[in-house]
Image (cartoon, coloured by chain):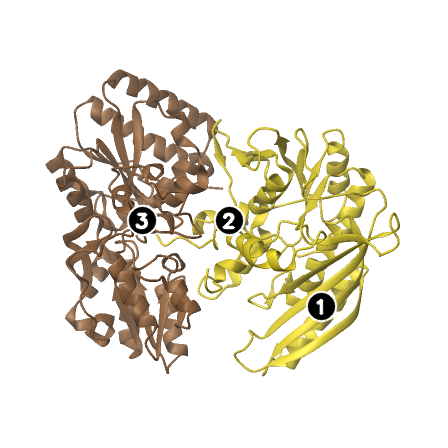
Chain colours: A yellow, B brown
Amino acid sequence: MSRILLDHGSGGKTSQELIEQVILPRLANPLLAPLNDGAVFELPGQAGGQRLAMTTDSYTVSPIFFPGGDIGSLAVHGTVNDLAMCGAEPLYLSAGLILEEGFDLSDLERILDSMRGAAEEAGVAIVTGDTKVVERGSADGIFINTAGLGMVRPGVSVSGQGARPGDRIILSGTVADHGVTILSQRKGLSFSTELRSDSAPLNGLVRAMLTAAPGIRCLRDPTRGGVATTLNEIAAQSRVGMILEEDALPLREEVRSACELLGLDPLYLANEGKVLAVVGPEEADRVLKAAQEHKYGRQAALIGRVTAENPGRVLLQTPYGTSRVVGMLAGEQLPRIC
Amino acid sequence: MKYIDEYRDPVAVRELIQAVSTTAQRIGGEPLRFMEVCGTHTMAIFRFGLRQILPGNVELISGPGCPVCVTAMAEVDRIVELSRREGVLVATFGDMLRVPGREISLAQAKAQGGRVEVVYSTLEALELARKNKEAQVVFMGVGFETTAPTVAAALFQAAGEGISNFSVLSCHKLLPPALEALLSGGKAKVHGFLMPGHVSTMIGAGAYEPLAREHKVPCVVTGFEPRDILSGILMLLRERAAHSHRVLIQYSRGVSWEGNTRAMGLLERVFQPRDSLWRGLGRIPDSGLALRPEFQGFDAERVFDLQPVPETEAQDPPGCRCGEVLQGLITPPQCGLFGRRCDPQNPVGPCMVSSEGTCAAYYKYN
């Protein structure tokens, strides 16, 4: 790899290689090393005290405004959700704006209003920020970076390494809504659909799930790379296998049609308002019920289980009694040619 | 979902498997090798795990039906070279981006500063030309009879609008001549073809008649759902059992005997057949499409005065056996590079690049 290719940002295997081969060797430390959605730590000299979670993410999306959200709400939801996936209550966010010369001021106002709305819903405050303007052509309209700080709930310990054989896998709702919505808005591919992005703050939903079952082993939001990539990461980190039931995956009819038409696999498309939870078998029903009672988890479903066999691999069982491997995303998914 | 769910019904699928097994058992003898020509078939077979439920004496092999995979390295080299020229903007389907040429791929050319944009259709490429008047937009035309008519339609539109900064580098290929070459070559042992649903929508099932007759091999134009594919296999088995070699249409909801004569008419007004270099299969007479002289203003080869594609393909990268994979001579795991030096992020050969490539399918699902 002598130059950065777009694939390095896809969230799949290529991104993972960039992190493991180029970034980690240079920036490694014990808090970064587990590669969870954020770092969890205690303040120096306060061992055993309040644990904090910290995370950061940069947002680029085209188009900037899409059905169900925009880059502003996405930037708040994404970071709130990363904190929630650490088992934390999000408190404070930072916002860094990189604006391209010539960017429409009314669009910026709309984005900022949307950020405020998203922050209010999530119950977080944007407490510090930065603005840079770059020359026309050096950015695509607007890029946003947000970082977040939250407090980890006492007694909660979630980690990508936590999955154990026998555990159940719960997904909080339909797959690929965000990915297909964005694709449907792309120029040249635009198809008409009623679909909206699922972009949403998940801290309330996660709070409800953790209240029902503080022992949840692992929480992840399957964003870039989709459910397939996220589950592969957990399987690798926990050294376990996973079996999914194809029939059990919640999938909207419009999403399914679009994927069939374009030759895309919804398991690899992004979600921005879904959580994957790995829970012990005895807690599964409670978590599922708590999720289904929350407005962002109505269609939550039990989609599979964790196995001791095939460590590091995710298998999917078809309705025909056959199975197939669900690997990590390798490179961007592209609509088929013929 | 209408038109899909009924073709995935597990009960119907199980009945078909039963019928396939009984018929295959009755035929007995040496294993029957059926070639699925289309990359979409290859992916569907893996996606539904169909190999796991086929009887032992029915073997499915993949053919040269992925347009990205059969594009010659020399053709990639030409578009890479164009992308480096001052004032040129290359528009391409995303799948072509990562296909390695002799030196580099379009994705690498892009990272090095070449102007390359991914489009989802020829019309989108035309839109790029309208928007970037200062640039010469070159569309890399890949694909079989399915894609070529859309390129033809775009060229009619471009001509009508008098757009002067748009051209097509035609790498289009025709499927029937390649299958003919595959069988005439004598190396590939094929007992029946599952013919591609999409291409056949255009060319019609009748296009396979000479092939079936000449080589005494049954052909079934097949859809892409589990019931379609298993029905296609069952129809092939029944042809074998009856020592018959007809061309049959399983995918009758999409394909007719004559095909889409209007689209093919459009294609013929813009393109004419020419010899073409295929990855793995070499040069095949009249298996490619060149722009007709009337459209030379849109022909990137003329506009940029390009050297013709060489008579023979430059040597494959050492160890790469895509050529044999494309002919159904080996399965991907038999290639020494498979999964070791060659994987979807660092593809050595084209069959690993395209999402519908045989190697990519084996890699993804194994």
Q: On the image, numbered disc 1 is attached to which residue?
A: A114
Q: Earlier in the sequence, mark 1 or mark 2?
A: 1
Label ID, residue B131: none
The lab-note entry on whether marks 2 and 3 share a chain reads no
Q: Secondary structure at mark 2?
A: loop
Q: Is residue B137 above or below residue A201?
A: below
Gap in angstroms between the C-alphas marked 2 and 3? 20 Å
Q: Position of residue A129 (x, y in %)?
A: 75, 73
In this rendering, position of residue B222 left or right of residue A143? left
- Looking at numbered disc 2 in the image, what kind of residue is underneath it? Leu
In this rendering, position of residue A181 left or right of residue B214? right
Q: Residue at x 16, y 39 (%)?
A: B183
Q: Position of residue B49 (x, y in %)?
A: 43, 32
Q: Secondary structure at mark 1?
A: helix
For label 2, the crowd category at 10 Å Cα-Cα, with few meaning under 14, some 14 to 19 and many 20 or more, is many
Q: Residue at x 48, y 55 (%)?
A: A332
Q: Position of residue A199 (x, y in %)?
A: 66, 57
Q: On the image, numbered disc 3 is attached to which residue?
A: B66
